[in-house]
Amino acid sequence: MAELSGTAGSFNFTGVISDCNFNIRSWSAEGTADTHEVTDFCDSGYKTFIPGLKGWTASAEGFVDGTNTFAFSDIGTSATLLLYTSDTTKYYTGTAILTSWSPAVAVDGVQTQSFAFQGSGILTTV
């Protein structure tokens, strides 16, 4: 099995946040599905479930270098999110809403900022 390096990954929240303007160094995404309990007397004491609504979230982290200024008003923006893997021809894409921005400063490190997104609709693999 061939492992893939993350060094060629990339991130773009169309028109708002990208690798180039926010020094993005990592991203992650998580798909979820709700479940609904449908246990009845015939289930012999074991809970049973059926699938419900699906959704996804994503996050990204980058360095602050003094040239990238984030506008607080960008929180709540809806745009296309592109999450590239180490193979730049393969990526995940979908519409997302920027739900949070978290700057952080530590005395023994560089300034960072993280962003959180709520997916709206399906996250497609291209």
Image (cartoon, rainbow, N blue to C red):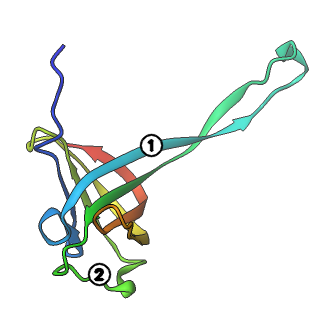
Q: Residue at x 66, y 31 (%)?
A: 50
Tags 1 and 2 touching, CB below 8 Å: no
Residue 18's place in the image compared with 26, above or below, is below
* Secondary structure beneath label 1: strand
Q: Nearer the viewer, mark 1 or mark 2?
A: 2
Residue 97's place in the image compared with 73, above or below, is above
| Residue 31, numbered label | 1
**Left or right, 99 with reference to 46:** left
User: Which residue is disc 2 drawn over?
Assistant: 70
* Secondary structure beneath label 2: loop
Q: Residue at x 19, y 75 (%)?
A: 15
* Residue at mark 1 to residue at mark 2: CA–CA distance: 27 Å
Give the residue type at disc 1. Answer: Gly
Q: Which corner quadrant of the image does residue 104 belong to?
A: bottom left
Residue 46's place in the image compared with 126, above or below, is above
Q: Residue furthest front?
A: 108
Give the residue type at disc 2. Answer: Phe
Q: Which corner quadrant of the image does residue 76 belong to?
A: bottom left
| Residue 45 vs residue 28, the one in the foreground | 28
User: Residue 60's x, y, as percent?
Assistant: 32, 58
User: Residue 90's x, y, as percent?
Assistant: 14, 41
Residue 60's place in the image compared with 104, above or below, is above
Q: Which corner quadrant of the image does residue 72 belong to?
A: bottom left
| Residue 20 vs residue 76, the one in the foreground | 20
| Residue 25 vs residue 118, the one in the foreground | 25
Dot 2 alpha-carbon crowd within 10 angstroms: few under 14, some 14 to 19, many 20 or more: some
